[in-house]
């Protein structure tokens, strides 16, 4: 029997990566809460973890400069937040909402981290045969 | 966490808010600086912020956006002109000029700036905590 880290750890390493990126996005929103015309952004981690929505038809690339559709970057698209109360200066950051999202995201990151840690200590126990 | 970009972002936000707080302090300190001509009178100074994008691709795909301080502008609001012929700074017509600083507006600005600054500190602390826990993974 062989141990595969990918099988043992499940979705969590990927979740950690996405949560870390979302932390950056939400931090940008909070930093720009007073920047005129700045639009708050976010993305849906759960949707990305579920994988591609539907199989896409393959595109033929006739030049190496063409962007690929299968890229992680193409799949990973930032969306714009719809503000509940629009500000006059065109800024759509609502600090209380962003703070709540930031806290939630940090908590979920820590949850994933705990799962990974738990898996690791489980594997260590199995390896040591204690 | 892939990089330390989040520290740059929160840092740029703190930098911007600190400038705003400094300008508010200047405005409030000079609220009673009278003079005898429009040119010499202190005018309310306000910061101009903009989101920093390096290029169009970043605008679509980059997860981090720093705050850029474009500069400081003087308020175009009219100065407060007051008839005070006995004032030592009065001009030939007996008028003195007071800055166009609105103390109430400045106080509101001050609270908003310090709240935003705190937000960024909070982001920094949380990000650092997350990183420390990640570094300890598997131990």
Image (spheres, helix red, strand yellow):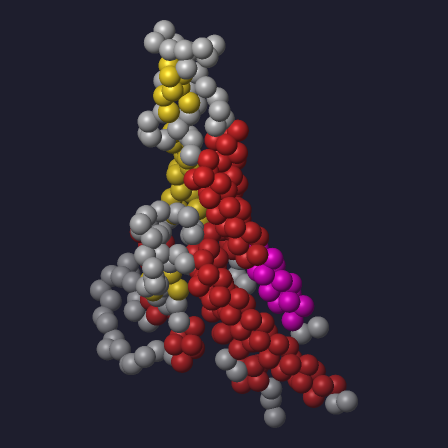
- Residue most extreme to the bottom: A1
> Considering depth in this image, is A126 or A103 the residue closer to the camera?
A103
Q: Can residue B129 be found in the magenta stretch?
A: yes
**Residue at 51% across, 39% down:** B21
Q: Residue, x 33% and y 27% (percent of image)? A: B78
Residue shown at 57% from the left, 56% from the top: B122
Relative to B45, residue B139 above or below = below
Q: Is residue A127 above or below residue B17?
A: below
Q: Quadrant of the C terminus of chain B?
A: bottom right
Q: How many marks are shown on the rendered structure? A: 0
User: Which residue is at the front of the view, A69 or A60?
Assistant: A69
- Residue A60 lies left or right of residue A85; in this view the side is left
- Left or right: where A1 falls relative to B12: right
Q: Main secondary structure of the magenta part?
A: helix
Asked if residue A122 is among those painted magenta in the image, a careful observer would answer: no
Q: Position of residue B46 (x, y in %)?
A: 41, 35
Is residue B25 visible to us here? yes
Is B48 situated left or right of B129 in this image? left
Quarter occupied by the N terminus of chain B: bottom right
The residues colored magenta run B124-137
The percent position of residue A39, horizontal first and vertical second, equals 34, 55
């Amino acid at each position: 029997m062989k141990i595969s880290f990918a099988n043992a750890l499940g979705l969590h390493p990927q979740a950690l990566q996405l949560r870390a990126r979302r932390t950056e996005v939400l931090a940008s929103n909070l930093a720009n809460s007073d920047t005129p015309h700045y639009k708050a952004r976010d993305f849906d981690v759960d949707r990305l973890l579920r994988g591609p929505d539907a199989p896409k038809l393959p595109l033929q690339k006739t030049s190496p400069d063409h962007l690929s559709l299968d890229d992680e970057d193409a799949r990973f698209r930032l969306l714009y937040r719809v503000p509940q109360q629009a500000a006059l200066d065109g800024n759509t950051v609502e600090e209380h909402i962003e703070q709540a999202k930031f806290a939630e995201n940090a908590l979920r990151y820590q949850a994933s981290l705990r799962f990974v840690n738990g898996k690791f200590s489980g594997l260590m126990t199995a390896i040591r045969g204690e | 966490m892939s990089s330390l970009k989040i520290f740059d972002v929160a840092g740029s936000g703190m930098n911007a808010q600190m400038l705003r707080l400094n300008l508010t302090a200047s405005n409030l300190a000079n609220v009673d600086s009278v003079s005898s001509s429009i040119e010499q009178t202190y005018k309310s100074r306000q910061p101009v912020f903009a989101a920093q994008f390096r290029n169009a691709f970043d605008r679509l795909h980059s997860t981090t956006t720093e705050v850029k301080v474009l500069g400081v502008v003087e308020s175009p609001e009219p100065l407060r002109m007051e008839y005070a012929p006995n004032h030592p700074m009065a001009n030939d017509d007996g008028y003195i000029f007071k800055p166009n600083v609105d103390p109430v507006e400045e106080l509101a600005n001050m609270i908003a700036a310090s709240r935003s600054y705190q937000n960024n500190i909070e982001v920094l602390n949380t990000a650092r905590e997350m990183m420390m826990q990640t570094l300890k993974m598997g131990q």
